[in-house]
Amino acid sequence: MCIFCKIVNGEIPNNTVHENEQFLAFHDLYPKAPVHILVIPKQHVDCFQDVQPEVMAGMTMFIQEVAKKTGLDKTGYRLVANNGEDGGQEVMHLHFHILGGGKLRWDHS
Ligand code: 5GP
Ligand code: ZN
């Protein structure tokens, strides 16, 4: 079982931000911004490339709720989905990064 499925099952503790039947939002253990939240579907999907549009519809609404709950809807935030090897995806369970809490840099590399 993947580490995010273990988080969903309560086998690994997490710092939950928001939750419903289908989705879970929790703080990233190694934050890359002042606020760094991960959003996952509770049902395992490997990556963005494999996700069903119906799941994404729910995910969109859920992410908007997370932003409202944390005040990021007012300040702004960055939404990131690393996909596959070249995209830098390390955990193969679909997740969106919500990054905020300050002005974010946008450098080319
Ligand atoms: P990826 O590189 O796959 O897009 O992002 C994986 C993210 O999961 C990373 O930002 C990493 O810090 C985070 N992460 C890895 N293991 C854990 C964990 O056990 N708990 C939490 N909360 N975050 C984790
Ligand atoms: Zn999983």
Image (tube, rainbow, N blue to C red):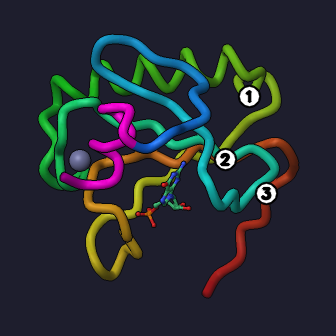
User: What amino acid is labelled 3 in the image?
Assistant: Leu
Which comes sooner in the sequence, label 1 or label 3? 1
Which residue occupies the foreground of this view, 64 or 29?
Answer: 29
**Residue at numbered disc 3:** 104
Which residue occupies the foreground of this view, 98 or 75?
Answer: 98
Give the alpha-carbon distance from disc 1 to disc 3, as whole Å. 13 Å
Give the alpha-carbon distance from disc 3 to disc 2, as whole Å. 12 Å
Q: Is mark 2 within 8 Å of ligand 1?
A: yes
Magenta-tinted stretch: 1-11
User: What amino acid is labelled 2 in the image?
Assistant: His
The local secondary structure at tag 2 comes to: strand
Q: Is residue 30 left or right of residue 9?
A: right
Task: Give residue 81's quadrant in the image.
Answer: bottom left
- Disc 3 crowd, CA 10 A, few/some/many (<14, 14-19, 20+): few
Task: Give residue 37's quadrant in the image.
Answer: top right
Instruction: Tell me the number on the disc at residue 36.
Output: 2
Image quadrant holding the C terminus, namely bottom right
**Residue at numbered disc 1:** 72
The local secondary structure at tag 3 comes to: loop
Query: x%, y% of residue 84?
Result: 26, 71
The local secondary structure at tag 1 comes to: helix
